[in-house]
Amino acid sequence: MKFTIEKAVLVKTLGHVQNIVERRNTVPVLSNVRIEADNNGISFKATDMDTEITEVVDAKIIENGAITAPAHMLYDIVKKLSDGADVELTYPDDKEQLSIVSGRSKFSFGVEDFPAISADTLPTVFTMKCEELKDVIDRTQFAASTEETRYFLNGLYVHPKDEGETKVLRIVATDGHRLACVETPLPEGAAKMQGVILPRKTVGEIRKLLDDAAVENVEIALSESKVRFNLDDVTLASKLIDGTYPDYERVIPTSNDKILEVNVKEFSKAVDRVSVVAERTRAIKV
């Protein structure tokens, strides 16, 4: 394998894939990124066996092949190379070392086999606008639980819902103390999907990818156990949380008789000012 790629493109791609890799890993190969050169371009893949990301970029390919290398170390090295420089990656057939050369800098890495989790067929497929998906994530993910003992709350619950004659896609998050619930028009193809729980880490990673997306829409594919997001040249696949989400509708108040409408920005600024002196409970009185 041998190819040359722009430093800026390589840094951006490695920045995406290294977010999936845990810095402390009991399985050494899971600390690596898999790099493969073929006629379709250069693909970079990383996984923690629950979530998997693949990104394909263009480069000057001299020889096809595949290799793995430590993801965080590779990212840190490439990030420090000179701006505007080209980076050459070489993996000779007769050696077990990946060579990275840029100007007068040269580095080498060992190789290992690499696992994959995204080969399954996912029967439910639908499309959402990137801005729409960003909006529902931003309005719900803050309420997801971080307690590992209640693992079924550690993500977003997504399911179709009938609201009278209107069908919507409902996204819910709760940590047992607060609850966020957002609805968006039901995408075509999502009507028969089962309710699924997207892991908090997966939600965070797709949210970062949406900021860099060069496309208008994201394709979402689902099965009973996995989800896959396709953003043109980037694919994020993940296992779903295996559990039963609680009946959240029971805790949504329905008989509140005091209604107040306020300007969002003014209210946010007022809360921010008084919360400076809030005690450990972070509570304020309205």
Image: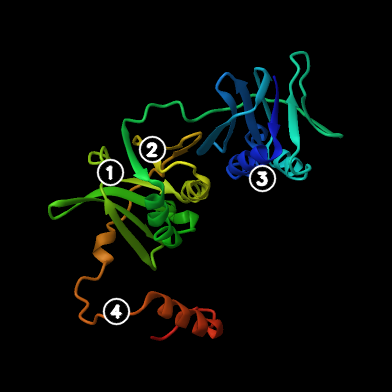
Residue type highlighted by circle 2: Glu
Disc 3 + disc 2, Cβ < 8 Å: no
Label ID, residue 219:
2
Cα distance in 3D space between marks 4 and 1: 31 Å
Identify the element where label 1 is drawn. Answer: loop
Q: Which residue is mark 4?
A: 261
Q: Is residue 78 left or right of residue 225?
A: right
The local crowd at label 2, few if under 14, some if 14 to 19, many if 20 or more residues have their Cα within 10 Å, is: some
Cα distance in 3D space between marks 3 and 1: 37 Å
Q: Residue at x 46, y 83 (%)?
A: 270
Q: Which residue is mark 1?
A: 187
Residue type highlighted by circle 3: Arg
The local crowd at label 1, few if under 14, some if 14 to 19, many if 20 or more residues have their Cα within 10 Å, is: some
x and y, in percent, of residue 94 in the image:
77, 13
Q: Residue at x 38, y 38 (%)?
A: 219
Residue type highlighted by circle 1: Pro
Q: Given the current orientation, which residue lies at the most extreme front position?
A: 84
Q: Is residue 124 left or right of residue 76?
A: left
